[in-house]
Each structure stands twice: as C-alpha cells, then as structure tokens.
Amino acid sequence: MASVQESIDVAVPVSTAYNQWTQFESFPRFMGGVESITQTSDTSTHWVTSIGGVKREFDAEITEQHPDERVAWKSTDGESHAGVVTFHRLDENTTRLMVQIDWHPETFTEKVGAVVNADAAQVKGDLKRFKEFIEKSGGETGAWRGDVAAPPTGGSG
C-alpha cells in the first residue's frame, strides 16, 4: 500500500476552505488528472480520471464528514483508495489543510510512481492549485454542511 501525507496553509477562514472542499464537482479545476466528478448523492461520487495516459472510472463514498473539521472517503469499486482531509484553524483568516491518501498501486507505472514519490508530488501540486483557486476566488463556490458519522468499528460479527 502507498500512502501520501501533505499539508498546506491557505489564507481563508476554515469554513471557506471546508465549504469549497465539499464541492467535489469543482475538483477538476485544481486537481491534475481528474477529468470529472459527479456527486450522485450526499455521500456518493463518481470519478473519471486520466493519469499517465491511463483513464479510470470509480465510485467513492464519504465515510465521515464533520463541518469545518474533516472529510473522509473510500472507493467502493475500481481503484482501491481511501483518504481524509482535515481542516485546522490557525487564526481567523488562515486554515491548514492536512491530506492523507492511502492507495494500492496496481500497474507497473503506478508502483514506480509510488516508489519515486510521484504521487506525493501530485497531491502537493493539487493542494497548491487549491490554495490559488480559493484565495483568488474570494470565497467558496458552494457548500454542503451535512454531517456524516463515522461507521461503527470493532465488535464481533
């Protein structure tokens, strides 16, 4: 399994950063390789990506979401990955986004990319473009402030 952890500080209030992050259909504006995202329900999305000449489609679900705090997701088919972004108020007008993505490289190219940290460079670039996007726009393009509880863990089944 490959894992990427990156963070960035953006010069907007935490609610603005969070609200924009919940607008999944805007991700292609700042995420390299993401062609489109369609939100099919409050907690379901369909992704179309093209990275390194490999086009993929997969569905993902929001597994946990708390306004101004965190959004966690996992794939439900296709690519095997999961992630979380957390939002940290540094001051009234500055927010730190921390992103962690865990994924299973499948192709030879993906495995080599993980070894040479190309995946980390991609996430870092995406966060820089998010920073530019949100700081230049002067505000979020929308918001979804719903709360999604984390699935129960533990127990015997």
Image (cartoon, rainbow, N blue to C red):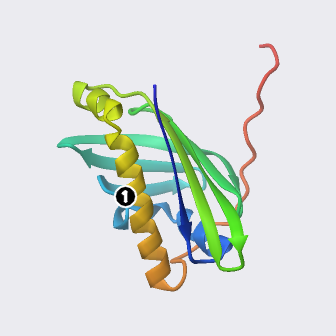
Which secondary structure, mark 1? helix
Residue 88 placement (x, y as % from top left)? 68, 62
CA neighbours of label 1 inside 10 A, class few (<14), some (14 to 19), many (20+): some
Question: Is 118 rendered above or below residue 7?
Answer: above
The residue shown at (71%, 58%) is 69
Residue 11 image-quadrant placement = bottom right
Question: Is 50 rendered above or below residue 128?
Answer: above
The residue shown at (63%, 74%) is 94
Question: Is 103 rendered above or below residue 129?
Answer: above
Is residue 50 found left or right of 5 in the rendered image? left
Residue 155 placement (x, y as % from top left)? 82, 19
Residue 80 image-quadrant placement = top left
Residue 28 placement (x, y as % from top left)? 35, 62
Toward the right, the furthest residue is: 155
Disc 1 marks a residue whose amino acid type is Gly
Is residue 112 found left or right of 91 in the rendered image? left
Is residue 129 found left or right of 141 in the rendered image? left
Q: Nearer the viewer, residue 92 or 76?
A: 92
Residue 61 placement (x, y as % from top left)? 55, 44
Q: Which residue is mark 1?
A: 125
In this orientation, does residue 37 appear?
A: no
